[in-house]
Amino acid sequence: MKPAAETPMQRDRAVTIYEKSKPGRRAAVLPEAGVPERPLGELIPPKLLREEPPRLPEVAEPEIVRHYNRLSRRNFDLDTGFYPLGSCTMKHNPRLNERVAALPGHARLHPAQDPRRAQGALELMWLLQQSLAEICGLPQVSLQPSAGSHGELAGLLLTRAYHADRGEQRTKVLAPDTAHGTNPASVAMAGYEVVKVATNERGGVEMDDLRAKVSDEVACLMLTNPNTLGLFDENIAEIASLIHAAGGTLYYDGANLNAVIGHSRPGDMGFDIVHVNLHKSFSQPHGGGGPGAGPIAVSERIEPFLPRPQVVKREGANGSGPFYDLDHDRPKSIGRLRGFQGNFGVFVRSYAYILSLGADGLAEASETAVLNANYLKARLADGRAGKRLPVAFDRHCMHEFVLSGKPMKRELGLATLDLAKRLLDFGFHPPTIYFPLLVEEALMIEPTETETKESLDAFADAVEEILAEAERDPEVAKQAPYTTPVRRLDEVKAARRPVVRQPL
Amino acid sequence: MPDASYPEELLYHAEHDWARIEGEQATLGITWYAQDSLGEVVFYDPPEVGAAIVKDSAYAEIESVKAASEVIAPLSGETIEVNEALADAPERINEDPYGEGWLVKVKLDDPAEAEALLAAVDYRKLLEGD
């Protein structure tokens, strides 16, 4: 296979805004001051003044606009095409949410505003807390954690505070071998030792292994349900009673909550702590560094330790009606997890999403997510994909499913990575690959509820076409992609010699 | 990358490790299949010299472009040497898994443990049945 000619975008090397800088260029020229100018030294204490100006890029406005426009075109996003990244819930971001978040009272609110003058914002946060509590089936919510992994860390710190309050020091946290990589990382960061639990032949927790590992040293079990295989663990009631009987807490990784909203609730399954990814399940844009939020919902026994301040609703004195406040008076709290009150715009978008769908709409969205995943799984069980890319655990799935590229690699010499790269040339973002680790050559596919049947069919057709092409000439996929702004990246160099500084 | 091979003179562990036993010592590494599954290795985190390693337990970590994985010990013993060259050239694990890509040398606790390991022919069968 001869490499295709370079596209204009491939020839156009991406540069940073600093590389575009030329001394003296300006995007705006300030008018003469209408008041007498005074030397800076008179206005600002000299010890706070810079000796030389900051090295900011000097670029004219047209070039700034082109620069960022060009960068945006190098990106693949949900507004461009299908993005079935497993366990990431890349669903459509409703534009109504953007309109609401952009209202001046939301967008221009200063984070240091006195709570008495930010009653609307606090009310929205309180209402969001109430909604998430209802969805999770747990009484209390903190909006402070800013990502799923941050919620995990919060949950483990809460677990430690809970045990310490009872005079216990436990050292181990259990997590299945299908867990998201953030789970063991959070465990290590919180100072616990992670103990892996095996997976059974149906893709759930291996109960004998769990029984063998539960002890009074175990602080917590972290579980994702449905798990990263897209499978609901049918033994959850027994798992919960095992952990609770041994005195541990049960943590729910909410990355896959999109499968069950309005159908089953982590609190009802016996979980003590749940994190919710507002940027997955509740339609906040994400990927490419968009802000996230990983609120946690907790049971009564964990509530005293929640981060502070908590957003609370108080009764007014002398019949003045209720008001909203930040409660700092929480003596057992694990403390603050971040500055200010979180990414407020994320709260606005997610609350708008919850209100616009309503309880029935949220339940229907989860049903459609599960239906879409099962439809695509069935499409990919036919034809070449069914033979070369068998499903790892053959059950009805929830919102996502995992295929194994092992036969494809053995029979065609095509690795899952090659298939993923070739999908880019067909206009699709590849699924998650090589995860979960227990499935060889894994592809983890989550279509979400916001894709049409036509999109799902087109994706299945593309996989079929790539496999047919590889039967004729596997080199085509091995050299892919051809059409993206950059071709294959040197992942080894990126991992071993990362360039993380931009010289100015 | 070399083609698949499983030298006859080595003994194998089902977790895709090999051992070359020389008297009371053994050299350990990962098999061709293991390095092929991991993909390009970018980092090797060895045990310390003197550290005890325990059969069937993790003794080192290998990070590839795909994942970080634990290396399981095929035999128990005391670490007497680690392959320092891998710090700068972990790709040797891919290029020469049975030669320059060796991971550690150990002084065996119990040479009889080797009886539980697999011959090359049995390890191949395990891979085919997998």
Image (cartoon, rainbow, N blue to C red):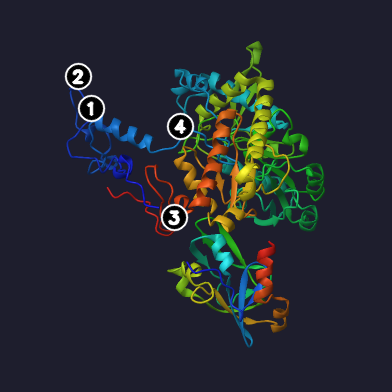
Q: Spatial distance from mark 4 to mark 1, Cα to Cα?
A: 33 Å
Label 4: which secondary element = loop
Between discs 2 and 1, the one toward the N terminus: 1
Between discs 3 and 2, the one toward the N terminus: 2
- Residue at the image point whose x is 45% and y is 50% from the top: A476
> Where residue A424 sits: x, y (%)?
46, 42
Going by the picture, which residue comes out furthest to the bottom?
B23
- Residue at the image point whose x is 22% and y is 36% from the top: A41
Dot 2 crowding, Cα within 10 Å, few <14, some 14–19, many 20+ = few
**Mark sitting on residue A34:** 2
Q: Which residue is mark 4?
A: A80
The image shows residue A441, relative to residue A82, as above or below, that is: below
Q: Amino acid at mark 2?
A: Gly
> Where residue B96 sits: x, y (%)?
49, 72
In front: mark 3 or mark 4?
4
Q: Which residue is mark 3?
A: A491
Dot 3 crowding, Cα within 10 Å, few <14, some 14–19, many 20+ = some
Asked if badge 3 and badge 4 are on a common chain, one would say: yes
Q: Amino acid at mark 1?
A: Ala
Q: Which residue is mark 1?
A: A28
Name the quadrant containing residue B10.
bottom right
Q: Amino acid at mark 3?
A: Glu
Between discs 2 and 4, the one toward the N terminus: 2
Give A440 or B78, whichever is nearer the viewer.
Answer: A440
Label 1: which secondary element = loop
Asked if badge 1 and badge 3 are on a common chain, one would say: yes
Name the quadrant containing residue B88.
bottom left
Going by the picture, which residue comes out furthest to the top?
A319
Asked if badge 3 and badge 2 are on a common chain, one would say: yes
